[in-house]
Image (tube, grey):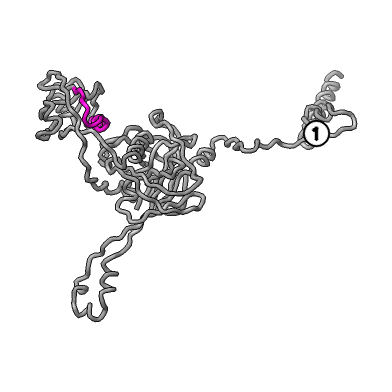
Amino acid sequence: MFRHLWLIFAQTVTVCIAVWFVVATLKPEWGPAHPAASASASAPAGGTVTLSQSAPSAGQPEPAKQGSYSEAAKKAMPAVVNIFTTKEVKAPRHPFLNDPLFKHFFGRELDQQQQQQRSSSLGSGVLVSSEGYVLTNHHVIESADEIEVLLSDGRRATAKVVGSDPETDLAVVKVDLKGLPSIVFGRPESAKVGDVVLAIGNPFGVGQTVTMGIVSALGRSHLGINTFENFIQTDAAINPGNSGGALVDAQGNLLGINTAIYSRSGGSLGIGFAIPANMGRAIMEQIIATGSVTRGWIGVEIQEITPELAESFKLPKNQGAIIAGVMKGGPADKGGIKPGDVLMEIDAKPVTDSSAMLNLIAQLVPGSETKMKILREGKPQELSVAIGKRPKPTRPARPAGEDDDE
């Protein structure tokens, strides 16, 4: 008897739950907990309440979707420009062009047309101020006769070169337009391996493009790309045409200037390099102020310390730079530095390797006196060296497969 009543009770409860589930799904407004029902219950007698979804306040961006970097891209993209350059190149003369009989019949006009041709290339740049200054790569605008900048809003303008620095592969050009956007500089010194980054540029001339990746490594040097190297490495796709474009963080702030890729095919293999924004800013400010970059120099030839050399020189670790040669009459020579010395510190800052040494000396002000700690025959010494001015360089060719703008 009781078992029969229990079965009836259980079936009744099951049916009620099923009915409640159907009603809650198909007619949620019938439920007492629904916002519309609550609002209606609290409304004055005889009144009506109309509910609508609230829109973001005027001028406020919609919140970014989880996992989306649309706001970062939206913030940075207007400041990234496309750069088109053209230059005249002389074509090799064909032997028959020197034939007087040919010139008699066809004239000199065809001769001149054959000698001169126009070459064009493309790259990218970053608007760093509303005054129209654009930071890009030196190799993007090198030897260009004409430079044209295309903004993301469709405006075009002819750009003038303010100055360039081949040793870091950076250059500054300027456009005269009103109402220009500008990028916000980030803090590359705070970047960490694994941080999400976006690369923005004009790959293959298809138009402005954003690719995503992470910071793969920091402080990359000894690549043979530039004289002064301290690259941010990323796997964000960087392809021909991206040179001079922006590498930005997840908030859309500038971390670096895309400059090169490692590739055997000419396309992205997931190893790209960007010049840190803090280095770019320092170079840019010098170029804008003086039209060029001034660096310290002491006139030495340096050699990397290998484990074998470290053992030979009785060094506790592979740190420092061996002075392989000293320019006669140069600052180092006058300061007492000799071949075979191991330079350990510059202005109380440790010399970790030859690349660090170059960077430390380059930051010194020409004409200033600087203390340098060396090891000579295993014994530490401190010398005072008057810093000279680094001579104007002749930029070496970029290694094959690492240029990415042509």
Say whether residue 361 is magenta.
yes
Please tell me which residue lies in front, 373 or 282: 282
Say whether residue 369 is magenta.
yes
To which quarter of the image does residue 219 belong? Answer: top left
Q: Which residue is mark 1?
A: 29
| Residue at 44% over, 49% down | 176
SS assignment at label 1: helix
Q: At label 1, which amino acid type do we have?
A: Glu
Magenta-highlighted residues = 355-372
To which quarter of the image does residue 343 belong? Answer: top left
- Estimate the x, y position of residue 51 in percent, counting from the top left: 77, 35
- Estimate the x, y position of residue 58 in percent, counting from the top left: 64, 38
Task: Tell me if residue 349 can be seen.
Answer: yes
| Residue at 15% over, 26% down | 342
**In the rendered view, does 57 fall on the left or right side of 129?**
right
Using a 10 Å C-alpha cutoff, classify the residue at mark 1 as few (fewer than 14 neighbours), some (14 to 19) or many (20 or more): some
- Estimate the x, y position of residue 157 in percent, counting from the top left: 44, 53
| Residue at 80% over, 36% down | 50
To which quarter of the image does residue 361 belong? Answer: top left
